[in-house]
């Protein structure tokens, strides 16, 4: 019994340490861009490395110049100018990608947190 308790305490300590370690990262950015609630804590999505590849894979099949969608989502400017709409259509709801499948929880986090953090060209 005692062993079990020690084990649980160990897990709890390890978990607490992990949570604190995560909060320590990127302090300046967190101050400049406070995350919306806890959902974005520890998510540091970048436009070039995370968001653009996601949009390329999941949206540009239709959202390209001359594509079946009414506007392109190919450049930073095009994407930023529709950031609010993109969040509504592909993160808050799953209207997009049109016809599905919906973005995964991880993909929604990348896109939603990048938008919540100001849609930076980073
Ligand atoms: C299969 C084609 C297709 C894919 C893939 C697709 N879209 Fe669309 N999207 C459309 C079409 C067509 C429209 C025009 C409105 C409609 O027909 O629903 C549209 C409209 C939109 C709108 C405007 C909606 C409105 O009512 O104002 C947004 C924002 C949007 N798409 C974002 C995205 C994002 C973000 C992705 C990727 C995660 C994506 N779309 C993937 C075809 C697509």
Image: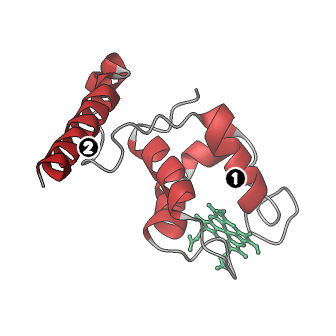
Q: Can you say whether 119 is above or below 110 in the image? A: above
Residue 72 relative to residue 89: left or right: right
Residue drawn at x 31%, y 19% is 27
Quarter occupied by the C terminus: top right
Percent x, y for residue 117? Answer: 40, 38
Residue drawn at x 26%, y 30% is 17
Q: Can you say whether 7 is above or below 90 in the image? A: above
Q: Secondary structure at mark 1?
A: helix
Which is more toward the observer, 80 or 100?
Answer: 100
Give the labeled residue for mark 2: 11
Residue drawn at x 53%, y 56% is 106
Q: CA distance from mark 2 to mark 1?
A: 38 Å
Q: Secondary structure at mark 2?
A: helix
Q: Give the class, few, some or many, for how many residues have Cα within 10 Å of label 2's Cα (few <14, many ≥20).
A: few
Percent x, y for residue 79? Answer: 62, 47
Residue 74 relative to residue 87: left or right: right
Give the labeled residue for mark 1: 55
Circle 2 or circle 1, nearest the eye: 2
């Amino acid at each position: 019994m005692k062993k079990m308790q020690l084990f649980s305490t160990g897990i709890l300590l390890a978990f607490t340490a992990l949570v604190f370690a995560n909060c320590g990262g990127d302090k300046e950015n967190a101050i400049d861009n406070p995350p919306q609630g806890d959902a974005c804590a520890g998510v540091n999505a970048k436009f070039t490395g995370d968001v653009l590849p996601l949009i390329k894979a999941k949206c540009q099949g239709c959202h390209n110049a001359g594509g079946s969608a009414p506007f392109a989502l190919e450049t930073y400017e095009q994407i930023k100018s529709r950031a609010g709409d993109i969040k509504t259509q592909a993160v808050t709801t799953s209207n997009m990608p049109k016809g599905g499948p919906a973005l995964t929880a991880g993909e929604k986090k990348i896109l939603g947190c990048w938008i919540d953090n100001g849609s930076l060209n980073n």
